[in-house]
Amino acid sequence: MRQHLFAQASELSSQFARRGAELDRLGLPPRDEIEALRQAGLLSALHATEVGGAGLSWLDGLRLVRIISRGESSIGQLLGYHYVNSQYVYWAAADARQAWVLGAETVERQLYWGAAVNPRDPGLVLERRGGHFVLNGRKTFSTGAHVSDRINVNATLEGKIANFVVPTDRPGYVAHDDWDNIGQRLSDSGSVEFRDFPVYERDFILPLAEPFDPPQVQATFNTPLIQLVFVNFYLGTAEGALAAALDYIRTTTRPWITSGVSRASEDPHILERVGELQAALKASVALADVAASAVEAALSKGRSVTERERGDAAIEAYAAKVNATHVALDVTAKVFELMGARATAAHYGFDRFWRNVRTHTLHDPVFYKAREVADFALNDRIPVVSLYS
């Protein structure tokens, strides 16, 4: 099953790459692309075999994200977000049986999971109404807004924090067509609105909590894992950019008039730069895999995991995030120096790789991640737990 899923991911990535420039220009909600992931079985790759999933590790799941991102960065992002959102209930839900029911349904129906939890927005508000609740409010960014079947949601209820999972086909869920950023144009990351959206007791995955109650440590692993999703789709995008550049150099780039060679692929300056970029990417990928293994090992401790163990693992993820940000931005920009002036023609769409990385690396400031890594190294302080750290 593992080899089959990796082969499926590689094939889909190649298909997405062939249509990459066109998909980027259209910038439509990626319904067909999510359906392709569904048909390939990739949506249930991390779910346990007991509920019908493939039972892959986080290390393998993040590698799948990287592979898909080589072909289309937004689809890699969406796959990674789905993995974190759909797996979150396993380690966060108060009732393990509820988590397994949700997992079994996800696998059986191959559901795609999103989330509406952006902490920078005003919170969503739940109110009691009759025998249930209604949800109202708006979130500016909700990746997978149009294509999500299930979403994780946080809201306030009478001054307390509620965590629940709901289907998006209930009345009152409105996904807006307002995602017009320069990159990640297929990530479907526009705003969503809830208008008297019905919520029921069975939707809650955690008991109501006071706003400043410390969370159970295991329930906070969504942050280092989502940061590792970022790491891997940045690197996958950079790998895709370099692969496209190498193909262009072999087939299209003309040797410079004073190079003394008959093919651009023999130009010593191009060879040197390709070697540097390739080496930087390989090192960053290795760091990403080490970080994934560290976070997975800590998460595997279950409810016995300590704050310190979580913090040690998170730092590995955040160091990988700092490195991958710089490497991916560097690679996606410098490939143009290898290909030459004609590669800037709009129909190639080679700029999409840089635009995609540039757009998402602003999700949370990388210098704050670097500061967390430094504070750990200098002062032995683990990061303060939040939805960003």
Image (cartoon, rainbow, N blue to C red):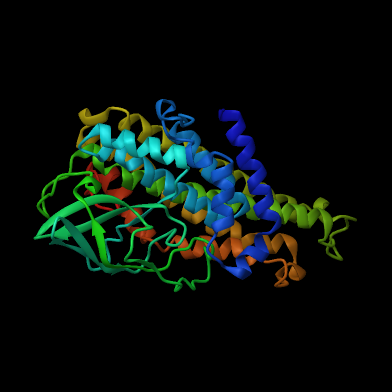
Q: Position of residue 324 (x, y in %)?
A: 48, 50
Splitting the image into 4 quarters, where does residue 148 fall? bottom left
Front-lying residue, 105 or 275: 105
Front-lying residue, 382 or 294: 294
Q: Is residue 323 left or right of residue 308?
A: right
Q: Is residue 157 left or right of residue 47?
A: left
Q: Residue at x 27, y 65 (%)?
A: 120
Front-lying residue, 299 or 307: 299
Q: Position of residue 343 (x, y in %)?
A: 74, 67
Q: Is residue 264 left or right of residue 304?
A: right
Q: Residue at x 76, y 53 (%)?
A: 247
Q: Residue at x 24, y 37 (%)?
A: 218
Q: Residue at x 53, y 59 (%)?
A: 329
Vertical relation: 367 (above or below) 175: above
Q: Position of residue 9 (x, y in %)?
A: 60, 41
Residue 129 visible to the viewer: yes
